[in-house]
Image: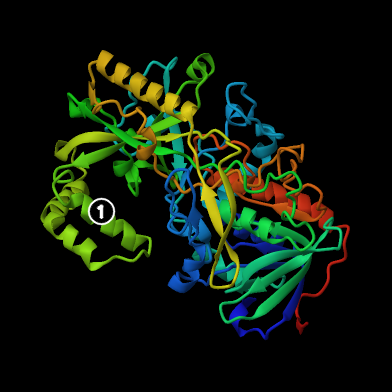
Amino acid sequence: MLIDGRALTDNSVLETGVVIVGGGIAGITLALEFNRWNIPVCLLEAGGVSYNHESHALYAGEVTDGLDYDLSSTRTRYLGGSSNCWCGWCRPFGTMDLERRDWVENSGWPISANDFAPHYARARDVLKLTDLPFDPHFWIRHMPESDIRLLPLDDRLLTTVVNHCSPAVRLGESRRAELEQSLTTKLVIHATASAITTDPFATHATGVRMKTMEGKNLVVKAKFVLLAAGGIENARLLLLSNDVQKEGLGNGHDVVGRYFMDHPRICLGRLTFHDADAYSRFYDVTYQYNNDNFSVRGTRAGATIGLSEEVQRSEKLLQCHTALFGSYIGENSFGVASCRRVYTALKRHQTVGLGDYARMAPGLAAATTAFLARSTRMRTLVQHYILESVLEPVPDRESRVTLSNKLDALGQRRARLKWRVGELEKKTHRRAIELIKQQVESLHLGRLEIDGDPWDDQWERSVQSTCHHMGTTRMHSDPRFGVVDENCNVHGVANLFVAGSSVFPTGGSNMPTINLVALAVRLAEHVKDMHEEYPVFDLSTVQAA
């Protein structure tokens, strides 16, 4: 059943077995799992079924003295969440991603790769992936693309890292009918969670309070409360839920919102190959994307260049994955950058002014040339390749989400973010680029040009967001260092759980999606086992409070 929160009477109450806050990838995964077992669910989506500017404006926030960050454009506020803008790259965590490393402060998970492994099959089903291997040689042998080779890297230093690419899985579109037609699932849209309600001692959650843009107040009462609203909103909602615990629910040790992580992304270096045929398009993100020649049995794949485990351990580094972006004729011409900025803003539903269009005008001809050149995907039209590196972040206690004193349109305190990137990330990035340059030039494949010293005191200015919000409700067996335990249960609140990458203690350098989906599947199974201890009751009525 689809329920529009705006159509309910003020102070309406819904009752359910499980309430899930957030209709993004983690939330929809949880709802699909409970639907399989006929467990009554209310899935709460703050937005609607499509983009709405007024609703999206509630995501605006405040950024303090860390790196620059746009809290609005890095999130998507309607059914499907980040799946509406996700590119699809997937790779499961490896053992090293989860283990404690003495050179990475605050690293280590309380669960292992073996705890994830049984749940990847279901995660692949949700994301429409196959169980094909990640071995680069498999893809070289089986891809339809005829001219594919691996770069001859010294695997003691650098390694080819394969990612699978999910098709355009827009879960709000592809799974909406399944959720609406379910006899046990209530999909509630246009209802923003404003607080988690608890018993007088905050040891049990009793439900969720909601607000609508029309000024209505709604309540869901539930046996279990699951937060799946993303790395910013999960923390924000816990902090806003301060009726009993004044510092915020689950925040007795001042951990909620801390350890915010994103994957630092840096575009740096121009790689030119002496012979275009010496280069494999397997590493070119611009060529791989939406190209069926890189598909086997319905799954596309692409490669990046990563640091070997041997180098990470011996030199005490993080992981760094570097992809190549073909720069085609015309792309570096005057005005093209302005065209790109306007295009990106429009794609993200951001406001574009007349001045932006005016600055774009001189670059239209060159941008058209570049677009046509890129459309051909001809190697001879590639000027060079830009290196784009995605780094594993260090969990930093001082990178955090707090509450701003500014209020949103619902009267709720907005989120405030501080994001820092440290010396270990810089050291790792510098070493990764040095090794790629060394390998390419020693093998006489080409030359890598770097202007000046990009790792000086201004290095942080080159760091961009990858829109992966992680760590703010981190998993740790000790409540002094984490918000949730190994079962994603908020410490001290028996029936309150958190899903999504906000529970990641460390982020690795892979895209988080398949891992957060596997973790959501694991969480659903845990809650199902607990739910069997409670009677299942009727969801069919909506009562007035």
Identify the amino acid type marked 1.
Answer: Arg
Rendered residue at 43%/24% (across/down): 427
Residue to which mark 1 is pinned: 340
Is the image coloured rainbow, by chain, by secondary structure, or in one colour?
rainbow
For this view, does 402 lie left or right of residue 321? right
Q: Position of residue 272 (x, y in %)?
A: 20, 28
For this view, does 193 lie left or right of residue 207? left
Q: Taking the image as drawn, is residue 306 in sight?
A: no
**Residue 440 sits in quarter:** top left
Q: Observer-nearest residue: 321 or 255?
A: 255
Rendered residue at 74%/55% (across/down): 249
| Quadrant of the drawing holding the C terminus | bottom right
Q: Taking the image as drawn, is residue 51 in sight?
A: yes
For this view, does 4 lie left or right of residue 60? right
Which SS class for mark 1?
Answer: helix
246, above or below 445, in the image: below
Q: Observer-nearest residue: 104 or 221?
A: 104
Q: Position of residue 541 (x, y in %)?
A: 76, 81
* Number of marks in picture: 1
Rendered residue at 76%/63% (across/down): 243
For this view, does 515 lie left or right of residue 185? left
Q: Observer-nearest residue: 18 or 350?
A: 350
**Residue 530 sits in quarter:** bottom right
Crowding near the residue tagged with mark 1, few <14, some 14–19, many ≥20 C-alpha atoms within 10 Å: some
346, above or below 428, in the image: below
Q: Position of residue 381 (x, y in %)?
A: 15, 40
| Quadrant of the drawing holding the N terminus | bottom right
Rendered residue at 32%/63% (across/down): 346
Q: Position of residue 459 (x, y in %)?
A: 36, 33
